[in-house]
């Protein structure tokens, strides 16, 4: 009944104590309300004047009002509490998502993560608001009422006591049935949201391939499944509400029946019988309320569990060593590095041995799928290695997710992400303060000046998803412009920085890029081999392993993997021509 997950919420103890106190008060007012009413009716029945029982009517009215004032205060406090909790969870969840990085979103699905942050937490808020007071009422109010009824009329107390476990049993059986339905509904909902967001993102591609209709049918199928799951959950929920109402009404009727019999036979006086009768529905009310809302808030309960599951995920390790970069000769030594993608069994990167020192340009080459991007992502600290033995400037590190390392790196992924922000903000990525002139100069250097001149608001133009779209090549050049603005960072991690550009643009950019690499240690992953003429040292990757390394001349002399790769790429280019 009481979810353990709830105990992990901050301030839960305080709110539970407050609710417990309010529940005791509420039980007291329910009893005084019934007491006043019974006394008044009993008095009138026995022929007293209205004035004679006016105090009892007063007690009834005051109790009635106070009972509802308490409900109001409780509502107010819970509202504050549940809003605060869901806000706090939202912040924690978002921070976690940021710390976990793209790995988490890839694992859970964009749709699921988005739904959880947007809808899931609203459901949690609703769940807390509805279920906490109901649980507390159920734990406190019936027992105080029962004790009072026993005190007033033992046989009625006995009936109430016997019926209660039967109702609880029914509630548990129906609750379990509803839970399995709701779980299924939630799973289908996750599938639906993932499907939906993925197809929205890929709608261009789907349309171009002419399969958007087929995909639409797919979504329709999943949403039908969701509808069926929802209806079947509702069926169980409505059935269980009906069953509970039926049983509680029946129980009240049984109490009334026996009281009536005893009244007729003169075995029971009217006053305690009336109190027992008035209190009987109040005794069952908390369990009815609880089970009604229990079904309505199952989604919130599931969402809360999901949120905690994500918050409990192991975070990528962070290393805090200070790496001494003041020396003008950075040194990186990797003796072992393994990495497996979460969804795959095979090692994407294995047995890497790499030793580089000084401001050098290091080429990483290999066929598509050989692991160049994975290696660059590992070096950037973007993904966490399974195993790493490495030293940077003589200091051992266990992961490249190290602040001191990341302050020195410029990382340009194969598909740079352009934030929905102004062009200025997008370019000023690595530097805090820089003049507009310098930004425009960087834009010029990456060959985007003509495009820039057409922008309606110049550097203030908003670009990125949902605003002015940029092409793959433009995105790469914007990412490259970031590099031009920085003169502090010593390590450059380039992953196919010119892959989206045509040969002419690439040749122009090459001239601009070479000085960038002059006083830096650059890792340059590419399959455009003409860059290798500029590289001081080259590593050849095959199936995630370094199979050959050396200077360009050495590799040509070896007539090994590099030459094979060059021939293969050459053939490929020729075929493409
Ligand atoms: N997100 C991912 N999940 C699972 N496997 C992946 C993922 N990304 C890459 N891989 C696998 O890891 C291996 C290395 O891929 P990687 O992207 O590093 O190659 P690459 O050399 O950069 O290729 P390209 O030249 O096409 O960019 C491939 O076998 C690929 O299938
Ligand atoms: Mg790649």
Image (spheres, rainbow, N blue to C red):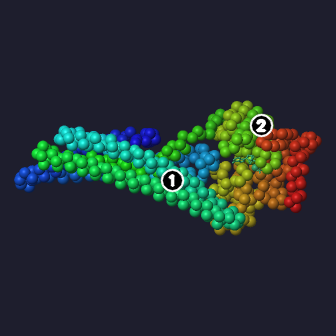
Where is residue 292? Give x, y as percent. 37, 52
Number of labels in the image equals 2
Secondary element at image label 2: loop
Q: Tell me the distance, in whole angstroms, between the alpha carbons under discs 1 and 2.
A: 46 Å
Side of 499 where 270 appears, left or right: left
Specify the farthest residue to the right: 557
Q: Which mark is residue 509?
A: none
For image coordinates 55% across by 60% down, the residue present is 223
On the image, the x and y values in percent for residue 436 come to: 67, 58
What number is the disc on residue 352? 2
Indicate whether 215 appears above or below 304. below
Residue drawn at 59 percent across, 59 percent down: 196
Q: Nearer the viewer, mark 1 or mark 2?
A: 1
Look at the image and tell me in which quarter the N terminus lies: top left
Q: Quadrant of residue 438?
A: bottom right
Residue at mark 1: 185
Q: Quadrant of the C terminus?
A: bottom right
Q: Which mark is first along the chain, 2 or 1?
A: 1
Q: Is mark 2 within 8 Å of ligand 1?
A: no
The residue depicted at 82 percent of the width and 54 percent of the height is 510
Q: Is residue 441 left or right of residue 506?
A: left
The reply to whether callout 1 and callout 2 are in contact (CB within 8 Å) is no
The front one of 236 and 80 is 236
Give 14 or 532, whichever is nearer the viewer: 14
Q: Nearer the viewer, residue 13 or 323?
A: 13
Residue 101 is left or right of residue 155, and the answer is right
Indicate the position of residue 505 as horizontal and vertical percent values.
Answer: 81, 60
Task: State whether residue 79 appears in this view.
Answer: no
């Amino acid at each position: 009944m009481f979810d353990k997950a709830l105990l992990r919420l901050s301030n839960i103890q305080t709110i539970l104590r407050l609710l417990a106190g309010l529940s005791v008060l509420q039980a007291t007012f329910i009893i005084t309300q019934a007491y006043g009413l019974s006394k008044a009716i009993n008095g009138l029945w026995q022929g007293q004047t209205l004035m004679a029982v006016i105090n009892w009517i007063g007690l009834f009215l005051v109790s009635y009002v106070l009972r509802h004032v308490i409900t109001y205060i409780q509502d107010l406090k819970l509202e504050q509490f549940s809003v605060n909790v869901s806000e706090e969870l939202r912040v924690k969840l978002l921070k976690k998502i940021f710390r976990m990085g793209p790995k988490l979103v890839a694992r859970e699905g964009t749709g699921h993560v988005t739904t959880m942050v947007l809808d899931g937490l609203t459901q949690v808020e609703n769940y807390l608001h509805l279920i906490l007071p109901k649980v507390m009422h159920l734990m406190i109010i019936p027992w105080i009422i029962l004790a009072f009824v026993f005190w007033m009329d033992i046989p009625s107390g006995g009936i109430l006591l016997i019926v209660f476990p039967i109702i609880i049993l029914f509630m548990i059986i129906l609750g379990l049935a509803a839970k399995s339905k709701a779980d299924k509904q939630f799973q289908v909902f996750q599938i639906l949201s993932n499907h939906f967001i993925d197809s929205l993102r890929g709608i261009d591609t789907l349309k171009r391939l002419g399969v958007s209709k087929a995909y639409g049918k797919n979504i329709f199928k999943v949403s039908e499944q969701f509808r069926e799951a929802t209806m079947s959950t509702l069926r169980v929920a409505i059935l269980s509400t009906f069953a509970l109402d039926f049983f509680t009404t029946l129980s009240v009727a049984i109490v009334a029946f026996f009281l009536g019999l005893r009244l007729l036979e003169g075995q029971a006086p009217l006053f305690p019988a009336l109190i027992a009768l008035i209190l009987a529905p109040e005794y069952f009310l908390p369990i009815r309320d609880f089970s009604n809302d229990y079904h309505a808030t199952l989604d919130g309960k599931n969402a809360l569990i999901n949120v905690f599951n994500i918050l409990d995920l192991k975070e990528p390790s962070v290393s805090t060593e200070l790496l001494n970069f003041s020396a003008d000769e950075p040194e990186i030594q990797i003796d072992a590095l393994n990495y497996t993608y979460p969804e795959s069994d095979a090692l994407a990167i294995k047995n890497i041995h790499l030793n580089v020192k000084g401001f050098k340009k290091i080429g990483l080459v290999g066929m598509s799928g050989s692991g160049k991007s994975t290696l660059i992502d590992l070096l950037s600290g973007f993904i966490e290695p399974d195993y790493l033995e490495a030293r940077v400037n003589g200091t051992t590190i266990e992961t490249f997710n190290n602040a001191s390392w990341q302050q020195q790196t410029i990382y340009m992924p194969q598909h740079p992400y352009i934030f929905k922000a102004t062009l200025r903000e997008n370019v000023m990525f690595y530097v805090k303060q820089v003049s507009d002139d310098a930004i425009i100069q960087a834009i010029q250097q990456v060959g985007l000046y003509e495009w820039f001149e057409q922008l309606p608001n110049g550097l203030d133009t908003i670009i990125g998803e949902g605003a002015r779209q940029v092409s793959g090549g433009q995105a790469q050049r914007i990412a490259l412009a970031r590099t031009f603005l920085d003169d502090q960072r010593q390590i450059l991690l380039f992953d196919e920085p010119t892959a989206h550009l045509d040969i002419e643009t690439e040749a122009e950019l090459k001239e601009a890029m070479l000085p960038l690499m002059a006083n830096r240690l650059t890792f340059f992953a590419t399959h455009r081999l003409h860059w290798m003429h500029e590289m001081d040292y080259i590593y050849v990757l095959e199936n995630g392993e370094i199979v050959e390394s050396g200077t360009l001349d050495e590799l040509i002399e070896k007539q090994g993997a590099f030459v094979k790769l060059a021939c293969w790429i050459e053939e490929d280019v020729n075929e493409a021509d």
